[in-house]
Image (spheres, rainbow, N blue to C red):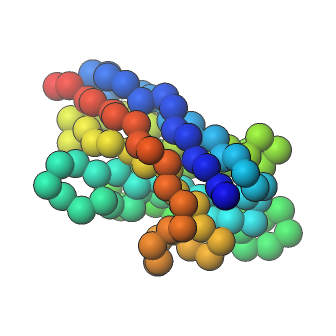
Amino acid sequence: QVQLVESGGGSVQAGGSLRLSCAASGRTLSSYAMGWFRQVPGKEREFIADTRRIGNNAYYAEYADFVKGRFTISRDNAKNTVDLQMNRLKPEDTAVYYCAADQQSIRYRLPDYWGQGTQVTVSS
């Protein structure tokens, strides 16, 4: 069974940066799509970014439009982790951030695996 554990959330002022990390255990996820979602109370969980394998040691990253140019996703298959570097944070980025993984896609189907979430709060 795959387990995902997020870390790195916290509070920051607008314009600041945070780095989230997701550590996977139970299975090597180098062939899995991995990425991040976020959710605010009363709204649906929304896709932020993912990284998926497209060939031997080749990975492709996709981003939601509202984070392009500000957030960067990266993965370390040796450590079984996926990180999200968040720069130029805005108050509207305040949410609970979730790590997700799936053998096929996390963007176009409901991921099989989720982390427990980590709170990010951006103050103005």
Measuring from the top left, give residue 6's x and y in whole percent. Answer: 52, 38
In terms of depth relative to the viewer, which is nearer, 73 or 27?
27
Q: Residue at x 65, y 71 (%)?
A: 103
Q: Residue at x 61, y 49 (%)?
A: 3
The answer to whether residue 40 is seen in the rendering is: yes
Left/right of residue 2 with respect to residue 9 in the rendered view:
right
Kindly give the residue lying farthest to the front in the view shown. 1
Q: Quadrant of the N terminus?
A: bottom right
Measuring from the top left, give residue 94's x and y in whole percent. Answer: 25, 38
Measuring from the top left, give residue 104's x and y in whole percent. Answer: 62, 76
Kindly give the residue lying farthest to the right in the view shown. 56
Q: How many badges with numbers are in the image?
A: 0
Measuring from the top left, give residue 93's x and y in whole percent. Answer: 28, 42
In terms of depth relative to the viewer, which is nearer, 88 or 5?
5
Q: Quadrant of the C terminus?
A: top left
Left/right of residue 58 with respect to residue 47 in the rendered view:
right
Q: Quadrant of residue 59?
A: bottom right
